[in-house]
Amino acid sequence: MSQAYDWIAPELNRLERVGWYRTPQISQSPPGPVIQFNGQSLVNFGSNDYLGLAGHPKLIEAAVNATQAWGVGSTGSRLLSGHRQLHQDLEIALAQFKQTEAALVFSSGYLANLGVVAALVSSQDLVIADAYNHASLKSGAKLSGAKVYEFAHGNLEQAQELLSQHRPHYRRCLILSDSVFSMDGDLCDLPKLLGLAAGFGAMVLIDEAHATGVLGPTGRGSVEHFACQEQPLIQVGTLSKALGSLGGYIVGSQRLVDYLRNRARSWIYTTGLSPADTAAALAALHLIQAEPEHHHKLWQNRNLLAQLLAELPPSFPLKLLPSESAILCLQGETIPAVQAMSQILHQAGYWVPAIRPPTVPRSRLRLSLMASHRPAQIIGLVEALQAWTV
Ligand code: PMP
């Protein structure tokens, strides 16, 4: 390669030096509570498949049937040749599940966030965002060209100050927040955020990626959890976590969806979701409403792990972060300490990824629960953690 690319090698060295260099490992097993790496079976605490649906026979059957009927690819953008009845059925089912007027399905949650944020605001507008928001919301805000101010994680007093100071100088204002923070597991105070937005004439967009299928009495997400269904807001999310498939969505008013169909570039200029992914997500929506036991099981498992982690002795070197979701995090002092812990758990037969900068400011073990974990697997994990302290 020409000299123009010579900067890449030293940059890779720098990433390695500061402990930020990452490579994916090949997982040799189908989705489930046990994952295989290099021939070793590990209990999987690193999956977003909260309800254990990614390998569910009903989703597989729906995907296979849709592929046989409609082929592998959807062959074009939704506005050209790539729109199928299946897409419409999924959007109707999503809107019904989320108790909104309408829905729009994107090729991924990342693309939904990019496209929706950049369609709602532009250079004349203001974005107020939680500093711990997902990378896709941050990228969407940047892409939009709006002026962006971040408030410290969860600090709505600071959000209010930013709104008081800057809102009068901009045309539109959009407040962005994850509803469940993906690397901490805590929740945004949605009722308070909506109250704040109403006072300043601001739109609110929440990212329900880790809340859909998880939070609320029937798994409809944080809006159900906080009983905010009647309030004006925009929800984005993914089909790739509790719904077990692939893709992203936005739900809200019919007018909003009509607007996004015409203005969200990451929806307009990309190929429609594949028939298999669409059909699997639709099957998942039917399944979680017909079989609430998956949701109950997830919460039993999550509450068991939360209780056992809370009982770890004060001398335990990692700190349990506050969480109200199916994500539980143990934060450590240094990157090597957290990586060492992840390695020890690996040797003991548990897959618990270490999350480190730049994804998070301080390294942590991130544990995500699945409905399909057995209690003995959760108890075994905590025993392996305890063995490290002695
Ligand atoms: N938002 C959040 C909060 C996420 O955690 C993720 C996935 N990690 C996304 C959006 C992106 O979703 P997808 O994987 O469907 O692109």
Image (tube, helix red, strand yellow):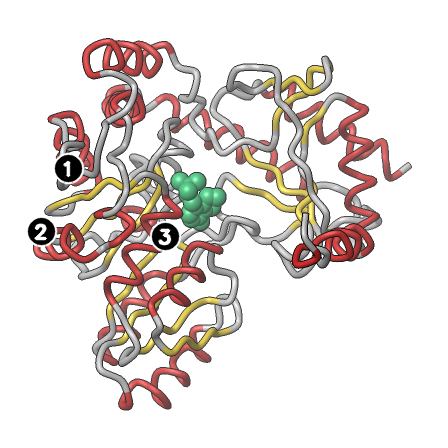
Please state if 317 lies on the left or on the right of 223 as rendered.
right
User: Residue 207 — which label?
Assistant: 3
Q: Nearer the viewer, mark 3 or mark 1?
A: 3
Q: CA distance from mark 2 to mark 1?
A: 12 Å
Q: Find residue 130 and report its horizontal and vertical position in percent.
A: 46, 67
In percent of the image, x 24 and y 25: which residue is there? 282
Please state if 315 lies on the left or on the right of 235 as rendered.
right
Q: Nearer the viewer, mark 2 or mark 1?
A: 2
Instruction: Categorize mark 2 by other alpha carbons within 10 Å: few (<14), some (14-19), many (20+).
Output: some
Q: Quadrant of the C terminus?
A: top right
Instruction: Categorize mark 3 by other alpha carbons within 10 Å: few (<14), some (14-19), many (20+).
Output: many
Mark 1 beta carbon near ligand 1 (under 8 Å): no
Q: Label 3 is placed on what type of residue?
A: Asp
User: Residue 96 — which label?
Assistant: 1
Q: Find residue 5 and report its horizontal and vertical position in percent.
A: 67, 55
Q: Find residue 92 and report its horizontal and vertical position in percent.
A: 13, 35
The answer to the question of whether label 2 and label 3 lie on touching residues, with beta carbons closer than 8 A, is no
Q: Find residue 179 and report its horizontal and vertical position in percent.
A: 39, 54
Mark 3 beta carbon near ligand 1 (under 8 Å): yes
Q: Give SS at disc 1.
A: helix
Note whether residue 100 is visible: yes
